[in-house]
Amino acid sequence: FDEHPRAGLATAHTNIALVKYWGKKDEKLRLPFTDSLSLTVNDFYTTTQVVVRDDGAPRRFRLSGQEVNGPAAERVWKYIERLQRRFGVSGTLDISTANHVPMSAGLASSSSAFAALAGAFAAAYELNVDREELSRMARLGSGSASRSVYGGFSRWIAGHDDATSRAVALDENPDLDIRLLAVQVDVSPKSVPSTQGMRRVVETSPYFPVWVEQTSKACDEMEKAIERRDFTAIGEIAQQNALDMHALNLTARPGFTYFQPQTLLVLQLVDELRHNGVECYSTMDAGSNVKVLVQSGNEARVRARIYEVLPQAPITSTGAGSGLVMTTL
Ligand code: PMV
């Protein structure tokens, strides 16, 4: 008998897609239609502890010390049961998690959340898994989480089944000056959850095949741009791919958009700054907030211009971050 319950602790950072995952081929296995490519960031992360108990205590899930029930907890427990079945392990879990993703940043936390949970689970059970396997485990919780296993730039290879769909590291410690500014234009919850948005474009947009083709090309071009440390190409490809994704949403039946009036304002400011010699590029995810890619020498100018026009919009700044770290306690 173990005197101490088995426990694992893990930290994962969020990532921002530079070439987006937008469409599932298999919803249950979370297999995407295309590869996607992202930058893991430094300042936003999730730390999760998993304790395996055999003493009959009820399962428990706490977020920042508060017990969570309802749909968010159900998603976590379904995910845990799936991992337990996959690895043939059992036990009642006590999960505590803390999200260091500022609410004001307008960044999704599911990528860091499910990568940290997969890591803490693997550490608690002392599973003999490598990082590609951890990426596959994280993918089952949230597609974008597959990429948060790695630091810096990583690419999620779409694959064709559960075994082949996983992310790989491209450059975990990029020797490249790249900053990401998250500009929050709106606090209300997103109008269309990502799963629903993806389903709608896959099932109804006549332009979906074009999106698949363009995104696959964008991934290959982005990988080359990263190899060359070519900030201009990275920014141009990222901005165009985000515009393609948001244009695709308008072509669903019925069309939908994440844009709010102030979203367009920030997109225009980014283009205006660039035309005036301050190099910066925009990208957006399943929400109305805008992320700006910029190099450190231009960061202050970008912030100042956005502040001038939208003084009430909080701006959070970050750089490249590290991959999943896990320990068995
Ligand atoms: O992993 P999900 O289901 O939260 O979907 C993420 C979708 C985007 O953030 C819009 C794009 C991406 O690749 O992260």
Image (cartoon, rainbow, N blue to C red):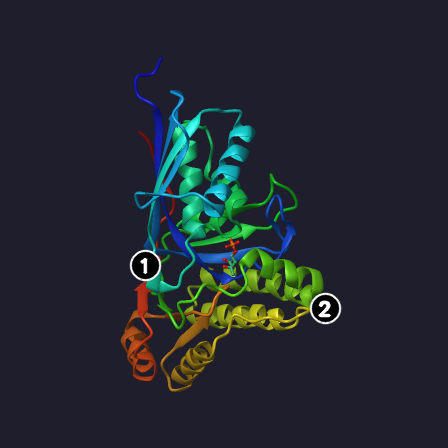
Q: Residue at x 49, y 37 (%)?
A: 77
Residue 309 position within the rendered picture, expressed as x and y whole percent measured from the top left: 34, 84
Q: Residues within 10 Å of mark 2 (few under 14, many from 20)?
A: some
Q: In the shown orientation, is residue 298 left or right of residue 78?
A: left
Image quadrant assignment for residue 93: top left
Residue 206 position within the rendered picture, expressed as x and y whole percent measured from the top left: 72, 68
Q: Residue at x 38, y 83 (%)?
A: 273
Q: Residue at x 37, y 84 (%)?
A: 277
Residue holding disc 1 = 102
**In this rendering, does residue 219 appear at all?**
yes
Question: Element under label 1?
Answer: loop
Which of the labelled discs sits on residue 206, or is there none? Answer: 2
Q: Earlier in the sequence, mark 2 or mark 1?
A: 1
Assess whether mark 1 and mark 2 are in contact (beta carbons under 8 angstroms): no
Residue 62 position within the rendered picture, expressed as x and y whole percent measured from the top left: 36, 41
Residue 300 position within the rendered picture, expressed as x and y whole percent measured from the top left: 27, 76
Q: In the shown orientation, is residue 155 left or right of residue 68?
A: right
Image quadrant assignment for residue 2: top left
Query: Considering depth in this image, is 151 or 177 the residue closer to the camera?
Result: 151
